[in-house]
Image (cartoon, rainbow, N blue to C red):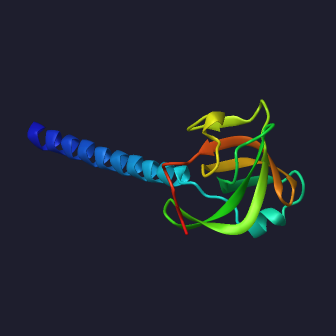
Amino acid sequence: MQIAQSRKLSLAALIGCAIAATIILIDVADRMEAMQPHGQTASAIAALPRGAKVKAIVEINGNPANGEFSGTILKEIGASQFQATPKALRIVTNAASHFLMGTQTDLHKGAVVEVSGRSVSSTAVAASQIVVLSGYVTVRP
């Protein structure tokens, strides 16, 4: 009788472990998806009202000066693969702008960044967060 009860407890523990492993795998997959860079389209950014949240992937066109730089808005064409659009975005940084995966010294011509912030105009954003993506994504012609 004790052997049968022990087997039932072992089976219940095994099923519990399988359920927990499944939940963990689903959570990890969701987090990995959330870590993939995604930006709004150039047309969506242009249509936003002043003060709206903006998230864009850009390739920097020149070296930043006075806390500002411009970049070509990129569109996603595959997993971590982007292509230039004809639209540019001016990014304004300040002391409160937070950098992830890099620093202000990583902002240079050709660098790829994900910019989050608030719309200043149809072609400008005040950056609250900048994620340096150079080396992690590919820009295709």
| Image: 44 above or below 135 | below
Q: Which quadrant is the C terminus positioned in? A: bottom right
Left or right of residue 14: residue 20: right
Question: Of residues 125 and 3, which is closer to you in this image?
Answer: 125
- At which x and y percent is residue 134? 54, 48
Quadrant position of residue 8: top left
Question: Of residues 86 and 20, which is closer to you in this image?
Answer: 86
Tell me what residue is drawn at x 78 percent, y 40 percent: 65
Q: Which quadrant is the N terminus positioned in? A: top left
Tell me what residue is drawn at x 15 percent, y 39 percent: 6
| Image: 77 above or below 67 | below
Tell me what residue is drawn at x 55 percent, y 52 percent: 34
Left or right of residue 8: residue 127: right
Left or right of residue 83: residue 15: left
- At which x and y percent is residue 3? 9, 40
Quadrant position of residue 40: bottom right
